[in-house]
Image (cartoon, rainbow, N blue to C red):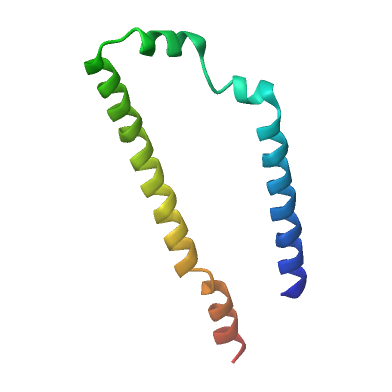
Amino acid sequence: MIGEKIKVGKWLRLAARALLVMAAIPDVLHAQACPLCYQTAASSSAQLIAALKNGVFVLIVPSFLICAGISYVTYRKRNACDEDEVSAGE
């Protein structure tokens, strides 16, 4: 159990460092902004800009809810295997 926590801690530190390195590289950040999309949005009317904002919202909400649902189920079932092993051993 303690060994698993150490491995997870090392993995999380490695992932955090990788994210920091990626955030520090300008080329990676430049890939986030498509010039064609930016120009199209900048030259759009207020109605199209509002539609784009709503589109982003519509795409983010289901993704967040799916991730939250998976996290909730995983948290609730985290000890399911341990309980089965304890019951079988008795």
- Counting labels gives 0
Picture residue at 43% right of the left edge, 61% below the top: 72
Of 63 and 73, which appears nearest the observer?
63
Quadrant of the image for the N terminus?
bottom right
Q: Residue at x 22, y 17 (%)?
A: 47
Q: Quadrant of residue 46?
A: top left
Q: Residue furthest left?
A: 47
Image height of 81 relative to 56, above or below: below
Q: Please state the horizontal and vertical placement of residue 80, each as a whole percent of the image.
A: 51, 73
Where 65 falls versus 1 (above or below)?
Answer: above
For this rendering, which residue is in front, 51 or 88? Answer: 51
Q: Residue at x 44, y 13 (%)?
A: 38
As drawn, 89 above or below 71: below
Q: Does residue 18 lie above or below 36 as drawn?
A: below
Q: Position of residue 33 (x, y in %)?
A: 52, 19
Relative image position of residue 42 (x, y in whole percent): 38, 11
| Quadrant (top left/top right/bottom left/bottom right) for the C terminus | bottom right
Q: Is residue 48 left or right of residue 41?
A: left
Q: Which residue is situated farthest in the bottom direction here?
A: 90
User: In screen coordinates, is 75 left or right of 59?
Assistant: right
User: 55 left or right of 12?
Assistant: left
Residue 58, percent from left and from top: 30, 34
